[in-house]
Image: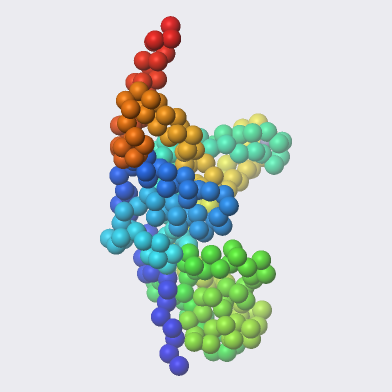
Amino acid sequence: MPDRAPDTLAVAFPSALPRVLTGRVELELADALTPRLPRPQRVTAVLTALFDRVGGEAATPSLLWRLATGARAHLLLRAARAFFPARGWFSGRCDGCGGEYDLHLDLGQVPRSEPLEGYPLVTVQTSLGPRRFEVPNGLTEDHLSRDSTADRRTLAGLTGLSDRAQAEAARFTPGDLAAIEAALDEATPDVAEEIQSTCPDCGAGVSARLDPLDFAFPAPDRLDREIFLIARCYGWDEPTILALPSARRRRHAAMIAADGRRGAR
Ligand SMILES: [Zn+2]
């Protein structure tokens, strides 16, 4: 029987065209960031909210789900850079002394690995013979995040291209599973998810997990406040205000706030 067609798209670090940032896009972003969704769903929703095109195609959820995990991480960093200052500060807590430290962080300089030849596919010599696998994509991440018993066998079943991948995954030896996992790890182009530095207080090495979902995107309170100010002062309705480019909306709100402060003196 022939292998099934891979789901993972062959592009490792796709180009991306952001949507024009408006209040409506920011609201969609706020919805996407809701903590009740599993992380892979939040990533897909954030990317759908912020990008118009990815890799030259419409940035639909079905396209974004099929990107490799590293490609999704790459796009999330790209999206974060629209909000987080180009050279910003990132706070963490030191495991050595318990103190808080600030790390200088440039989201444009996060290290990444390059894809291997043959990407997104790998061939592994298993005890059942040579078998092909695809590097994990968003759908794989989503499956794994919903299955609390997921292990290397689950990964082999999900990524295997054999038409009997699930049944074969049950028969792989521990050595097969280790080889499959190592081959997929090596072949998956990735952006660093940990940054290494030293604690300024005690000098201990610190490693901070870098998740743009945790720190890079704005809380929606500011948008609510700006809508309130503009609606009260100009009498515009909410859809009109949400349709304004975000930079213009912020300028209007800042002028109204400054005028209010002058009036109060
Ligand atoms: Zn320390």
Query: Which x, y percent locates residue 11?
Result: 36, 65
Query: Which x, y percent locates residue 33?
Result: 50, 48
Query: Which x, y percent locates residue 13?
Result: 37, 59
Query: Hey, which quadrant is residue 101 in on the image?
Result: top right
Observer-nearest of 114 and 262:
262
Q: Is residue 261 above or below residue 229?
A: above
Residue drawn at x 51%, y 79% as measured from the top left: 160
Number of numbered discs: 0
- Residue 110 visible in rendering: no
Query: Furthest-left residue in view?
Result: 56
Residue drawn at x 71%, y 40% as measured from the top left: 96
| Image quadrant occupied by the C terminus | top left
Q: Is residue 235 above or below residue 130?
A: above
- Residue 13 visible in rendering: yes
Horizontal arrangement in the rendering, residue 254 relative to residue 220 (left or right): left
Residue drawn at x 66%, y 39% as measured from the top left: 94
Query: Which x, y percent locates residue 196?
Result: 57, 45
| Image quadrant occupied by the N terminus | bottom left
Q: Is residue 16 above or below residue 4?
A: above
Observer-nearest of 47 and 156:
47
Query: Hey, which quadrant is residue 172 in on the image?
Result: bottom right
Q: How is the image coloured?
A: rainbow
Query: Furthest-right residue in view?
Result: 97
Residue drawn at x 27%, y 60% as measured from the top left: 56
